[in-house]
Image (spheres, rainbow, N blue to C red):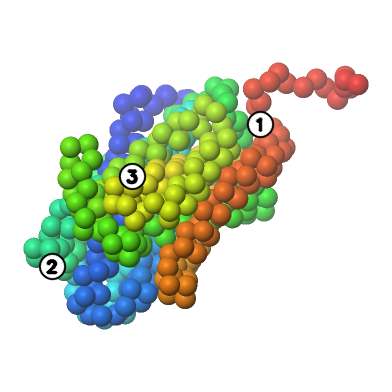
């Protein structure tokens, strides 16, 4: 039987680039949403809480269906499913452009979530399979497309909403984004057996065998990661969905801010820089984790996130600090989308990487259930203080869980799976040391 030749660097990076482009095209479905909330409410007076349910529906359908979608992608490959999902991405925003009822708005959110979930799960899963030697970096670069993909379109969308109405922005950006996904996805494929060599020994241990999704669900490290993902994800999703209302409550949204020679209203500036930093942090922390270990990187990032959220509460009423600190919060948050998929695949293997990470990615949907509660808690207390306190504490607790709960469990799980350790192999049992 002929052994498949190793894929060239151009092939591997070409696959990664195609996945990143697809991720960029679906970024606005989540990160551009906050620009539409105010105009929709101004037209229909449905209330922020009711409108934000659409965001929750989007995140739930984007995340909770990924295990099923991931199984199909692992079985049949990413090309067809992601290409067809580009059509759903376009349809979703077309529906939003004509939605004259909350029901129709929710339908658009559900359709967009299904399409985005396939694109997200398939692109990240493909990156994890093609780059076992740089898994954190590859997952981070792919996730960066989703985190920073909307940075270039924040201002054009805001301008189109102002000049032509939010309906036109939904329609034309939706069609453009969906068409690009459908075409670029035709270049995607999973690596053939033997096409990607096993990585050399490094600071990050990896399993030698592939866990099935059923085995993964029975593994304690999976559920620890799930809880941590929910804890950290909730604060970031709250910031994404509520940044515009928070800026208005702080009375800084329209105040001009000048930084790095650029002058923009504080909210527009924050949204732009947040997207960039939210993207940069993903490959950065992924690269760091490839060198110092996943849990060590989680501890640093989650702790910084907790501190950043609390600082935003204290100093966010200053427009310059609002821009800087919101950027810091996004920089310390987005890395969950590189660290968790890399860790999951390190522990559970490549064969079912898309499905297994899809199971873990549903934690984002669970976290999204907490987003509407932010409005409820704010209305009950009269300020955002309680929301910020809760988000900060959850991040700090997750940081310590990474070091003192996940790390020992992960080491034990890998040791039981015959994982090659960086230290010399132990002697046979008959030659035990005293």
Distance between mark 3 and mark 2 Cα atoms: 29 Å
Q: Secondary structure at mark 1?
A: loop
Q: Secondary structure at mark 2?
A: loop
Residue at 30 percent across and 33 percent down: it is: 14
**Towards the viewer: 33 or 302:** 302
Q: Which residue is mark 3?
A: 324
Q: Which residue is mark 2?
A: 165
Marks 1 and 2, the one that precedes in the sequence: 2
**Towards the viewer: 256 or 331:** 256
Residue 171 at what x, y percent from top left?
A: 16, 64
Residue at 33 percent across and 61 percent down: it is: 250
Residue at 47 percent across and 72 percent down: it is: 381
Marks 3 and 2, the one that precedes in the sequence: 2
Question: Looking at the image, is mark 3 or mark 2 nearer the viewer?
Answer: 3
Distance between mark 3 and mark 1 Cα atoms: 43 Å
Residue 407 at what x, y percent from top left?
A: 65, 39
Instruction: Indicate which disc residue 181 carries.
Output: none
> Quick one: quadrant of the C terminus?
top right
Q: Which residue is mark 1?
A: 419
Question: Looking at the image, is mark 3 or mark 1 nearer the viewer?
Answer: 3
Q: Compared with residue 415, is residue 363 higher up or lower down, i.e. above or below? A: below
Residue 372 at what x, y percent from top left?
A: 43, 70
Q: Residues within 10 Å of mark 2 (few under 14, many from 20)?
A: some
Q: Are the residues at dot 1 and dot 2 in contact (C-beta closer than 8 Å)?
A: no
Using residue 301 as the reference point, say whether residue 122 is left or right of it.
Answer: left
């Amino acid at each position: 039987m002929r052994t498949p030749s190793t894929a060239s660097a151009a092939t591997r990076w070409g696959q990664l680039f195609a996945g990143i482009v697809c991720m960029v095209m679906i970024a606005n479905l989540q990160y551009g949403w906050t620009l539409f909330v105010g105009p929709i409410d101004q037209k229909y007076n449905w209330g922020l809480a009711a409108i934000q349910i659409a965001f929750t529906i989007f995140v739930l359908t984007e995340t909770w269906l990924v295990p099923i979608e991931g199984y199909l992608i692992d079985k049949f490959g990413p090309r067809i499913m992601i290409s067809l999902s580009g059509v759903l991405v376009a349809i979703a925003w077309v529906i939003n452009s004509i939605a004259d009822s909350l029901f129709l708005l929710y339908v658009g959110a559900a359709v967009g979530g299904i399409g985005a979930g396939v694109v997200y799960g398939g692109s990240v899963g493909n990156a994890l399979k093609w780059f076992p030697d740089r898994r954190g970096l590859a997952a981070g670069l792919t996730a960066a497309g989703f985190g920073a993909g909307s940075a270039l379109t924040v201002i054009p969308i805001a301008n189109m909403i102002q000049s032509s109405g939010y309906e036109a922005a939904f329609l034309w950006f939706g069609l453009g984004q969906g068409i690009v996904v459908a075409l670029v996805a035709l270049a995607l494929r999973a690596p053939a057996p033997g096409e990607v060599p096993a990585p050399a020994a490094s600071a990050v241990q990896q399993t030698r065998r592939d866990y099935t999704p059923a085995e993964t669900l029975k593994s304690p490290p999976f559920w620890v990661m799930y809880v941590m993902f929910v804890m950290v994800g909730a604060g970031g999703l709250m910031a994404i969905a509520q940044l515009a209302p928070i800026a208005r409550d702080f009375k800084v949204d329209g105040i001009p801010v000048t930084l790095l020679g650029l002058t923009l209203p504080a909210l527009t500036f924050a949204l732009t820089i947040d997207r960039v930093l939210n993207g940069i942090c993903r490959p950065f922390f992924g690269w760091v984790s490839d060198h110092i270990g996943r849990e060590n990187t989680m501890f640093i990032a989650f702790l910084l996130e907790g501190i950043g959220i609390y600082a935003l509460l204290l100093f966010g009423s200053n427009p310059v600090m609002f821009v800087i600190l919101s950027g810091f919060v996004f920089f310390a948050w987005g890395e969950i989308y590189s660290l968790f998929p890399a860790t999951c695949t390190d522990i559970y293997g490549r064969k079912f990487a898309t499905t297994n990470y899809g199971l873990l990615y549903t934690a984002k949907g669970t976290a999204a259930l907490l987003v509407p509660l932010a409005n409820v808690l704010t209305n009950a207390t009269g300020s955002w203080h309680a929301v910020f306190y809760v988000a900060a504490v959850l991040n700090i607790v997750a940081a310590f869980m990474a070091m003192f709960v996940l790390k020992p469990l992960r080491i034990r799980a890998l040791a039981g799976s015959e994982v090659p350790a960086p230290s010399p192999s132990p002697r046979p049992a008959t030659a035990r040391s005293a």
